[in-house]
Image: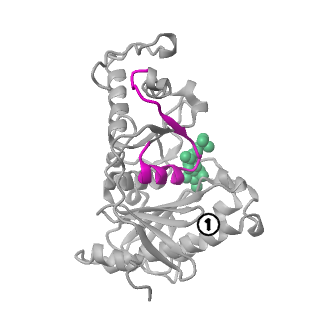
């Protein structure tokens, strides 16, 4: 027994013991953690495990599926379907909701997950992750689609695994966001980053800059002011990151602050965003808010959005609260017509916007 170490089940029991039925939620999260350990081993095998293979199939979002997308999806299903704790599951990799098969019993929770986030990084050996969200389910009937379409505020737990140099599990059950590191020798997730806090201010932003010409003006305005740095309206230099793995971006923000943006872009006009509400934006928004940050579409608090479909996409802006609030203000000014036509500050040495004293 490693004295003084807090393992995942001990931590969860201490956090949840006053809640009725908490042992079932602890057990479900432990099943998710077991799936994460199995996925960690699969990801770590890389090409040796055939993970570089691309399939001919596409998922509900139209993304080409990698073999690892499908095998990690199956791993989550096998680890979580048998316990009698889950009434059904929704995954990025399955068009329809997954019904619990006979002889297993349905239980009081719904599990929604992205089994492999950042799939495009698999063949270049860059960090990927898994994202999960837990909703309550009343009764033991087979869930209808509507049962999954609850706003993010209804989540009872959310988290992600990050398969990097170490395997991490970062989660919340409604009382802060906490990080655990997998001790591979023992097989325990050990509490290593209790009560993570997102700094309210930052000088680091993450966005796929290749889409700049397709963004809405308030996002163009914000990013351009960051790039103008010390000589621009922000009067300080900013740094930029883009890993193309949301889990890795969010983890960086939880550890040192920052703002992550995957905004609406007109590259695909009918598409409101790249990321999916139920199993990417909502769990990440809960984690970020529980760590003192903010998460929005630019116009609406993420966790308040009433979902309309399982694989619905949304614009995502999340991270350091003061920066997210600034970006929301830029959206309000733009929508109210108070924001002058966007002209890059590169054409003069000062921003065109009357924002004196708001540096
Ligand atoms: P997934 O691999 O589950 O489809 O998620 C990838 C997402 C997200 O993790 C990342 O931030 C974003 O897609 C990257 O998008 P681009 O490839 O357009 O940069
Ligand atoms: Mn994803
Ligand atoms: Mn995915």
Residue at the far top: name it: 348
Location of residue 116 in the rendering, given as x and y in whole percent from the top left corner: 59, 59
Residue 84 position by quadrant:
bottom left
Left or right relative to 63: residue 269: left
**Depth order, front residue of 355/134:** 355
Q: Is residue 255 part of the magenta span, yes or no?
A: yes
Q: Is residue 226 above or below residue 321?
A: above
Residue interval drawn in magenta: 232-258
Q: Is residue 113 above or below residue 4?
A: above
Q: Residue at x 51, y 10 (%)?
A: 347
Give x and y (percent) for residue 162: 54, 61
Residue 111, percent from left and from top: 45, 66
Image quadrant assignment for residue 225 = top left
| Number of marks present in the image shown | 1
Q: Residue 311 versus residue 348: which sits nearer the camera?
A: 348
Q: Residue at x 51, y 49 (%)?
A: 249
Q: Is residue 53 left or right of residue 21?
A: right
Give the color scheme: rainbow, by chain, secondary structure or one colour.
Answer: one colour
Q: Residue at 74% x, 69% y: name it.
A: 49
Report the front residue among 62 and 292: 292
Position above or below: 339 against 324: above
Image quarter in which the C terminus is found: top left
Task: Find numbered disc 1 in the image and state the secondary structure of the residue it sits on.
Answer: helix
On screen, residue 211 versus residue 86, left or right, reads right
Q: Is residue 327 above or below residue 288?
A: above
Can you identify the residue that label 1 sits on? 72
């Amino acid at each position: 027994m490693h004295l003084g170490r807090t393992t995942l089940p001990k931590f969860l029991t201490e956090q949840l013991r006053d809640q009725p039925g908490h042992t079932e939620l602890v057990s479900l999260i432990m099943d998710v953690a077991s799936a994460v350990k199995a996925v960690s081993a699969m990801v770590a095998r890389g090409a040796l495990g055939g993970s570089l293979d691309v399939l001919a199939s596409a998922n509900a979002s139209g993304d080409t599926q990698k073999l690892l997308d499908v095998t990690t999806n199956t791993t989550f299903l096998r680890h979580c379907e048998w316990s009698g704790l889950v009434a059904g599951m929704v995954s990025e990799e399955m068009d329809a909701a997954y019904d619990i098969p006979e002889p297993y019993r349905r239980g009081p929770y719904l599990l929604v997950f992205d089994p492999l986030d950042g799939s495009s990084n698999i063949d270049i050996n860059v960090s990927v992750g898994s994202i999960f969200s837990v909703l309550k389910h009343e009764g033991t009937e087979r869930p209808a689609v509507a049962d999954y379409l609850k706003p993010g505020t209804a989540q009872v737990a959310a988290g992600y695994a990050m398969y990097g140099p170490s395997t991490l599990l970062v989660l919340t059950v409604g009382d802060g966001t906490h990080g655990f590191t997998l001790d591979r020798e023992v097989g325990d997730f050990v509490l290593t980053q209790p009560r993570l806090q997102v700094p309210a201010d930052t000088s680091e932003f993450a966005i796929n800059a290749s889409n700049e010409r397709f963004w809405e003006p308030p996002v163009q305005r914000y990013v351009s002011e960051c790039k103008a740095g010390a000589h621009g309206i922000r009067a300080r230099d900013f740094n930029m990151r883009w890993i193309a793995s949301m889990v890795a971006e969010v983890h960086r923000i939880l550890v040192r602050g920052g703002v992550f943006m995957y905004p609406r872009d007109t590259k695909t006009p009918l598409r409101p965003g790249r990321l999916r509400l139920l199993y990417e934006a909502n769990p990440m928004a809960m984690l970020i808010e529980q760590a003192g940050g903010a998460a929005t579409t630019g116009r609406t608090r993420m966790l308040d959005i009433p979902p309309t479909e399982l694989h619905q996409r949304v614009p995502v802006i999340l991270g350091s609260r003061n920066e997210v609030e600034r970006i929301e203000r830029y959206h309000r000014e733009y929508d109210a017509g108070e924001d002058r036509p966007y002209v890059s500050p590169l054409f003069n040495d000062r921003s065109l916007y009357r924002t004196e004293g708001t540096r």
